[in-house]
Each structure stands twice: as structure tokens, then as C-alpha cells.
Image: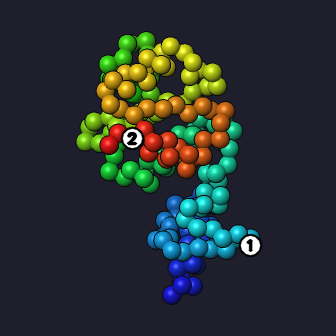
Amino acid sequence: MVDSVVDNVVDSVKGAIQGNDAEIKSTSNVSVKNNGQTVTAKNRENETGDDAHCEGSKSTICRRIEMAAAENWPGYELRRNISATELGADKKAHSFDYGLYLNGQPKVMIMILKQHQYRNENVRQAHEACKRNGVGSFHLLMHLPNRKTYIAERIKAVMPF
């Protein structure tokens, strides 16, 4: 029984690494030894590559946001390219790359920015509009690692109750 569960987990990880859409079966209370290291569900990113530095790739960051949303907030709708005017900001305010919505209501808004762009007034205006409306918001800077676990933790941290 344990051998078959471990085999399923290992096969799923191999499939994910090779780019297949392998589905990982229940991994609760399962750990796997990989090159002498114990791999649990918590640190599986090391095997799938989502713990690597994004190297400034916006497409990698987008993929990680989409994966984090799908895994942690399956009942939410993930929208792309949201104008900050939808949240009452001035039309010059910076738009959001992603928004998590529940029952049509915005809950968390995410921007992907270049290194010093967060200092711009148009970015601050967009974040302030979210704050006024009780919507969580944050930005990710492309020069930072932006690991999937980090993104999920940031979403959790700003998610309104």
C-alpha cells in the first residue's frame, strides 16, 4: 500500500518535471526520499522548478500566480489585466495584472512591476484605491525570485477576511 502511494507520487513528480499534466494524488502524510533528501508536499517546488529564481521572466511569474491561485483558491475567479478605475482610481493609475474575485467581488489585486516602478505615483494610486475598497493588493518585482510559495503567502497575507 505505502509502496504504491510512493510510486504514484514519484511518477506524478516525474511527469510534472517532464512537462506532462500528471496529477499528484493525495500526498498528505507521504514523504519521498530524493537524492538523500526527504521531499514532502511542503517542499515539492524544488522538484518542479517553481522554487528557482524567475530570472526576470514575466511569463514565469504569471504561471506561478496562476498555479498558486488554482491550488489555493479554487473557488475564486482569476482575472487578468484589470484597470484600477474599476476600483475607483484615477484613469492614470497603474492597472493590475491579476485579480482574484469571489462571487464577482474583487478580493486581491496583483501587479507585476520592474525594479523601481513601485515608487511611481500611478502605482500608489492603484494600491490606495484597493485599500479604500477593502481589497488586498500587492506587487511583485520582476528582478526578485517570486517563488510560487512566496506568491501564495503574499496573497494570504493581504486577503480580506
Colour scheme in use: rainbow
Indicate the secondary structure of the residue bearing disc 1: loop
Query: In the rendered image, which residue does mark 1 sit on?
Result: 36
* Residue lying at 43% horizontally and 17% vertically, measured from the top left: 125
Q: Please provide percent x and percent y for residue 113.
A: 57, 27
Contact between marks 2 and 1 (CB within 8 A): the answer is no
Q: Please provide percent x and percent y for residue 115.
A: 64, 25
Q: How many marks?
A: 2
* Residue lying at 49% horizontally and 47% vertically, measured from the top left: 152
Please tell me whether residue 141 is drawn above or below residue 23 in the rendered image: above
The amino acid marked with disc number 1 is Gly
* Residue lying at 63% horizontally and 21% vertically, measured from the top left: 116
Would residue 97 be seen by someone viewing this image from the given angle?
no
Residue farthest toward the left in the current orientation of the protein:
103
Indicate the secondary structure of the residue bearing disc 2: loop
Looking at the image, residue 136 sits to the left or right of residue 123; the answer is: left
Please tell me whether residue 158 is drawn above or below residue 87 in the rendered image: below
Looking at the image, residue 9 sits to the left or right of residue 46; the answer is: left
Which is nearer the eye, 12 or 50? 50
Identify the mark nearer the N-term, 2 or 1: 1
Q: Residues within 10 Å of mark 1 (few under 14, many from 20)?
A: few
Residue farthest toward the right in the current orientation of the protein:
35
Would residue 129 be seen by someone viewing this image from the given angle?
yes
Query: In the rendered image, which residue does mark 2 sit on?
Result: 159
Q: Please provide percent x and percent y for residue 100.
A: 38, 39
Please tell me whether residue 97 is drawn above or below residue 90 in the rendered image: below
Q: Please provide percent x and percent y for residue 76.
A: 34, 46
* Residue lying at 60% horizontally and 60% vertically, measured from the top left: 43
Looking at the image, residue 5 sits to the left or right of residue 107; the answer is: right
The amino acid marked with disc number 2 is Met
